[in-house]
Image: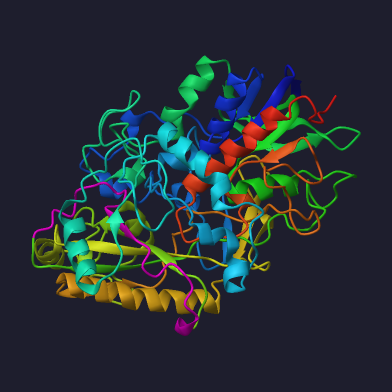
Amino acid sequence: MTDHSHVDVLIVGAGPTGAIAASELVAAGFSVTCLEQGDWTHRAVFTGATKDWELSAQRNWHPNPNVRGMPADYPVDVTDSDVNPLMYAGVGGATILYGAHWVRALPSDFRVATLDGVADDWPITYEDLQPFYEEMDQQMGVSGLGDDPTYPETAPPPLPPLPIGRIGQKAAAGMDKLGWHWWPAPNAIASRSYRGRDACIRRGTCQTGCPEGAKGSADLTHWPAAIKAGARLVTSARVAEITVDSTGLASGAVYIDRDGARHHQPASTVIVAANGVGTPRLLLMSTSDRFPDGLANSSGMVGRRLMMHPYAAVNGVYEDNLESWLGPAGQAIVSTQFYETDLSRGFARGAKWQVMPAGGPLGNRSGYGGHAEAGAGMDPTAGRDPLAGWGADFHREARRTFGRSFEWGIIAEDLPDGANRVTLSSDLVDSDGLPAPKIIYKTSENTRKLLDFHLARAREAHLAAGAVETYDTPLMRDCGWHLLGTARMGEDPGNSVVDQYGRSHDVPNLFIYDGSTFVTSTGMNPTATIAALTLRGVRQLIVNRRTQEVSA
């Protein structure tokens, strides 16, 4: 095994949180190395500007690593899961393929036990995060419109909103007719040139990578400056174990390069930023005499309470030409009309809605929308003749529906359940022989009731807007973009893994910065909250640098 020079901080994972942490730490004078199992993804390889975009989205740029099967991916055992986890291994992490929906959690999300008698309150409030939300808007180049009445008063995004297009206008007209809330959607996509990024040209292919570089992905927003400032980023480096010293402090990590050689990177402090599946997997693999059940796992909570935001959708077909192939995808408008708990509905909590474009002809097959996310998770021919929708049928349906449909997407708040979890597979391994993560995840009765209610309301919204047909997708199998809760924060070391700043209760120089620290899932896309938590946490680490326990 090759040993490398000692650094102040080792980061595992070069996604958005690893990038934010590295940027802050090198600016504060720390020596930083980041290990990333994937590689750089140059925007020239993205297929959104090519004729085979929709086909490539079903394999090479599919968000499911089990489908994509690239060298940097690890397999995931989903035999006991209702939902497939989605992720991307590479510099920038999931921001390479995400839709860049940049929305904040609501104040109520941090107090669901107090307000609604379910789950747990967070050890922090919205007000604790608000200044960090505002700063991350600037760093990511968010486009949007301020003063959404859903939120407390806050600074507006740095860029004006992207056009909501004809689909947004049509959807908004329906919402106005019903008297329901809607607002132009915030996206981490540049509406005009911003900090070296080009403006969005509205291809609508955001979820297979942005050829223009308009989307706020961490390989563009943070890593170039962090590396220029002195951070060292090692790609094709799959971390197998976090090591500990004789006192139980984290001392670095063992990683495997693409040639199969093992290396040890020693460090005074270790940050894990590997997402809500990769982080518990790594902690559970990091066993020792002192930590026989996995690192930082004295509470038994590592891997438990997995939340993945079950996603449903209603697509509406209209007589009007809505130009619904245009982006962003991205989201045009959002609604929180049914976000808060109303117990008369028979379930707790709610969901955020967003209008999404329908995509290309393949996605419009049989009248269904086909942006990248829906195309990956929706089977328009389910329960039908498998040949229906092809040949002459395909052309007839394309002429009837192409450009004339859009999706109301529904992100359901996923309440934590200790039975939903990440463990290590007993028989599936990755290309380096490391145990694959196994997902155990079942949708709850509360979730099913929630989705049924929201699907019915979304159909109403389409019909109020003039839709001539609607098509439901009650639950997308490929919808697990939001990997949350598997190393939850809390004040009690007996039922949580880290404190409010991401610091491990068991290993005081080990920090976790990703969605695994969420106490509840909220009903919002989580990246803005994950980024704000990371910025808050790493700045606290820097403030405490003189008193921080570190490995000798």
Expressed as whole percent of the image width and height from the top left, the position of residue 299 reads: 80, 57
The question of residue 334 being in magenta is answered with yes
Expressed as whole percent of the image width and height from the top left, the position of residue 178 reads: 24, 73
- Image height of 338 relative to 163, above or below: below
The question of residue 139 being in magenta is answered with no
Quadrant containing the N terminus in the rendered view: top right
Q: What residue is drawn where x is 57% and y is 15%?
A: 230
Q: Residue 270 or 476: which is nearer the viewer?
A: 270
Q: Residue 241 or 190: which is nearer the viewer?
A: 190
Magenta region: 321-345
- Image height of 117 relative to 231, above or below: below
Residue 508: image quadrant is top right
Residue 102 appears in view:
yes
Q: What residue is drawn where x is 19% and y is 74%?
A: 464
Left-right relation of 310 to 49: right
Quadrant containing the C terminus in the rendered view: top right
